[in-house]
Image (spheres, coloured by chain):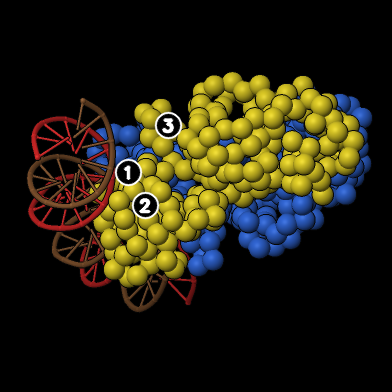
Chain colours: A yellow, B blue, C red, D brown
Amino acid sequence: MIDGLQQNYGDFFEPALIKEITSVGTFREVSEGDELIRAGSYIKSMPLIINGAIKILRQDTEGDELLLYFLERGDTCAMTLSCCLGHHKSEIKAIAETDASLVMIPVEKMEEWTTRYKSWRNFVFDSYHKRLIEAIETIDSIAFLKMDDRLLKYLHDKSKVTSDNVLKNTHQEIAYDLHTSRVVISRLLKKLETKGKVKLNRNSIEVIDL
Amino acid sequence: MIDGLQQNYGDFFEPALIKEITSVGTFREVSEGDELIRAGSYIKSMPLIINGAIKILRQDTEGDELLLYFLERGDTCAMTLSCCLGHHKSEIKAIAETDASLVMIPVEKMEEWTTRYKSWRNFVFDSYHKRLIEAIETIDSIAFLKMDDRLLKYLHDKSKVTSDNVLKNTHQEIAYDLHTSRVVISRLLKKLETKGKVKLNRNSIEVIDL
DNA sequence: ATGGTTCGGTAACAAATGTTACTGTAGTGC
DNA sequence: GCACTACAGTAACATTTGTTACCGAACCAT
C-alpha cells in the first residue's frame, strides 16, 4: 500500500501525510463489476484510487442511468468528498470498471487533514475542480453531440481507462451507460464498422481507429 | 456593503472574516444583461453575490450555449473559485440575469483565508458541493427529460430567481438557454398555453401554474 | 445432441426534435 | 402615415432517436 501511495500521490502529499494515510487508511481490493457506492446511501469513508478504474453513474428515481465519468489512479470521488464533509446522501452510484485497489480514508481524518495539511487541502480543491470540469464535459456531450459522436467518445474513453482497445461489452451495457436503447447502439456500431472504425464480435468491440 | 455581507453571509462567516472582506473586497453593481465572465478568459477575482441573480452558461467552441444554473444571494461561482485557486481558464460564461450587487474578492486573499478561516474553507467546500449537485441536476434534465419538461423546469426556475411570474423573455432567448430552436419553443409554449399553464404575450410569458 | 438463453442484426414504425419558409402583427423611427 | 424590424404562429418536411417485433447465431447446461 505504501508503494502505491508513494507512486501515485507522492508528488502531491508531503511525507508526513503519506505516513498518516498509511497508518489510518485501509487497503481494499475490488473486482470488476463490484458496486462501491449505491445511490442514496450514506458514506463514511473516502476512496483514494491506487490503480484500476471506477465508473461513476447518475441514477434517477426511475432507475434510469447515465455514465458521468471514470476515475483513475490518483483520483478520488468528489461526490464522496462532499458527502463526507457535508454529511449529505450520495447522489451517485460507483461501479468498479476494472479490478482496482483503493485506500479508504475515514471521514474524521479527512476533516482533520483539511486543517492541518496544505497539500491535502489543495488535493481536495483540485479534485472538486476536476469533477466539476468532468461533469461539465458530460453536459457538453449530452447537450451538443448526437448519439453517434457520444458513442465514439464513449468507446474512446473506455478504451483509454481500460488500456485495451478491445472492449468486452454487450451493446445493452453501452446503451445503459449512454441512456439509450440497445437497438440504437447496434445500429450506430454497425455504421462505425462499415466505416472501418471498429470491428464487432460477440461480447466485444475492437476499436480500430477513432 | 457591510449590511449586505452581514445579512447574507453573517451566519456563516465569523466577524473577523466579515471585517476582512469589507476591507479588501470591492463592491460592484451590475445591470441585467451585463456579461461578468466571458468563456476562455482568466479571472482574477471572485464574486460573492449580495443580491440579484446571475446565470451561468456553458459555451462550446462553435458558440452553442446551454444554461447550467442560476446563482443567487449567498452563492458564489465555484468555477471562478477553482479558476482562481487552480489558475485555470474559465470554462463558462456568466450573465447578470437581473440587476445585482456583488463583492469582488481578490484571488490572493482567497487563498490566504483558506488557510486561516475554517468558515471560509467550509464555505468554499460547500460552494463546490452545491455547484456539483447543480451540474448533475442539469445533467438529469438534459439526459432524462424531454424538451417539454425541460421548458417547464426552466420557466419554474427562472420565475423563482427573478421572483416574478411574468418572464420578460423572447422565445429565441429561451431557445438559446435550452440549446434548441425558436420554433420548438414556440410550439411547446403554445401547448402549455392550451393546457392553461402559461399565458403568452409579446415579449413576456406569464406563468400561471406549473 | 437437445433445449434454453443471451446476444446481435434488421425491418418497420412511432415519436420527438430540428429546419425552412412564409405569414401577420406589434413596435420603432422617420 | 410609411417603411422597417423584431417577434411569434404555423405548416410542411427532414432527421434523429426510440420502440416493437422477429430471426438466427453463439453459448451454456444437461
| Count of numbered tags | 3
Cα distance between the residues tagged 1 and 2 = 12 Å
Q: Quadrant of the C terminus of chain B?
A: top left
Tell me whether the residue at label 1 lies in contact with that at label 2, contact meaning CB atoms closer than 8 angstroms: no
Q: Amino acid at mark 2?
A: Ser
The residue marked by circle 2 belongs to what chain? A
Chain to which the residue tagged by mark 3 belongs: A
In front here: A115 or B56?
A115
Nearest to viewer (mark 3 / mark 2) = 2
Mark 1 vs mark 2: which is more N-terminal? 1
For this view, does B207 lie left or right of residue B27? left
Can you give x and y, in whole percent of width and height, for residue D26 in the image?
Answer: 24, 49
Q: CA distance from mark 1 to mark 3?
A: 18 Å
Front: mark 1 or 3: 1
The residue labelled by disc 1 is A172
Question: Is residue A195 visible in this depiction of the protein?
Answer: yes
From the viewer's perspective, tell me whether residue B91 is left or right of residue A140. right
B45 with respect to A53 (left or right): right
Q: Considering the image in quadrants, where does the N terminus of chain B appear?
A: top right
Residue C13 image position (x, y, % from top left): 9, 50
Secondary element at image label 2:
strand
Q: Which residue matches tag 2? A: A204
Instruction: Judge the density around disc 2: few (<14), some (14-19), many (≥20) Cα neighbours within 10 Å.
Output: some
Seen at 36% across and 28% down, the residue is A62
**Residue A142, x across and y down, in percent:** 44, 51
**Residue that badge 3 annotates:** A60
Q: Is residue C20 above or below residue B126?
A: below
The quadrant in which residue A69 appears is top right
